[in-house]
Amino acid sequence: MPPLTRRRALRLGGAAFTAALAGCSAFGGQSPPTLRLGRLVVTNYDRRPHTVHVLFVTDDSPDYWASKRVPPGDETSPGFARFEDYPTEPGDSVLHVRTDSQPKPGWERLDFGEQTTSCVGLVIGIGDPNGTSPGDVTIWKTNNEHECDGMTTTER
């Protein structure tokens, strides 16, 4: 390998700077697309019913709060509930989720400001299909654009 000369170092540095600059202008001066939330549902694999609480918070201020009672799952399928009237353009809000059986500091969180796609669908899971985590809460996310097909948006 040839030694690193001053000329070669400047050439490599210029190429790296140009590549970084091109990355910064990927949106051509436009802001990135608005994130849309296509669905917010709950599946309960636990054998007990649960009440699930969801809270959207922006800048330490609550934007949306709702609770749903979710029936228990059985051997063939999980219990199911669908949230409605939630913010479909959550912006930089943070979603907090917990069940009635979790301690209040035990909220699961999803930061919408960290998402890099234009559409997400969320499934809040209680327990798991194998029955190894009864009552545990998880937030499953899909970036499938079809989650947002035909939806109308509501700002937070």
Image (cartoon, rainbow, N blue to C red):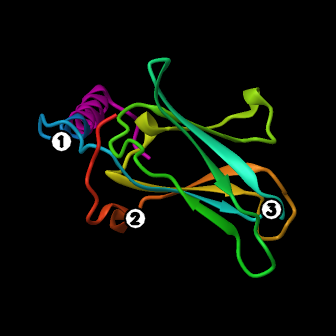
The image quarter in which residue 92 lies: top left
> Would you say 127 lies left or right of 88 here?
right
- Kind of residue indicated by mark 1: Phe
- First in sequence: mark 1 or mark 3? 1
- Residue 74: percent from the left, percent from the top? 79, 74
Q: Secondary structure of the magenta portion, mostly?
A: helix
Left or right of residue 97, residue 14 in this image? left
Q: Which residue is drawn at 25% across and 31% down?
A: 17
Q: What stretch is highlighted in magenta?
A: 1-21
Q: Is residue 100 above or below residue 50?
A: above
Q: In which quarter of the image is residue 72?
A: bottom right
Image x and y of residue 105, in percent: 74, 27
Disc 3 residue type?
Asp
Q: Which x, y percent locates residue 85?
A: 40, 47
Mark 1 lies on a secondary structure that is: loop
Tell me the SS state at disc 2. Answer: loop
Residue bearing the label numbered 3: 46
Q: Distance between the residues labelled 2 and 3?
A: 27 Å
Q: Depth check: 21 or 136 in front? A: 136
Q: How crowded is mark 1: few (under 14 residues within 10 Å), some or many (20 or more)?
A: few
Left or right of residue 133, residue 141 in this image = left
Classify 10 Å Cα crowding around label 3: few (below 14), some (14-19), many (20 and above). Answer: many
Q: Residue furthest right?
A: 132
Helix, strand or loop status at disc 3: loop
Q: Which residue lies furthest to the bottom in this view?
A: 76
Residue corresponding to mark 1? 27
Q: Residue at x 29, y 37 (%)?
A: 155
> Residue at left 38%, top 38%?
90
* Residue tagged 2: 144
Identify residue type, mark 2.
Asn
Say which quadrant the C terminus sits in.
top left
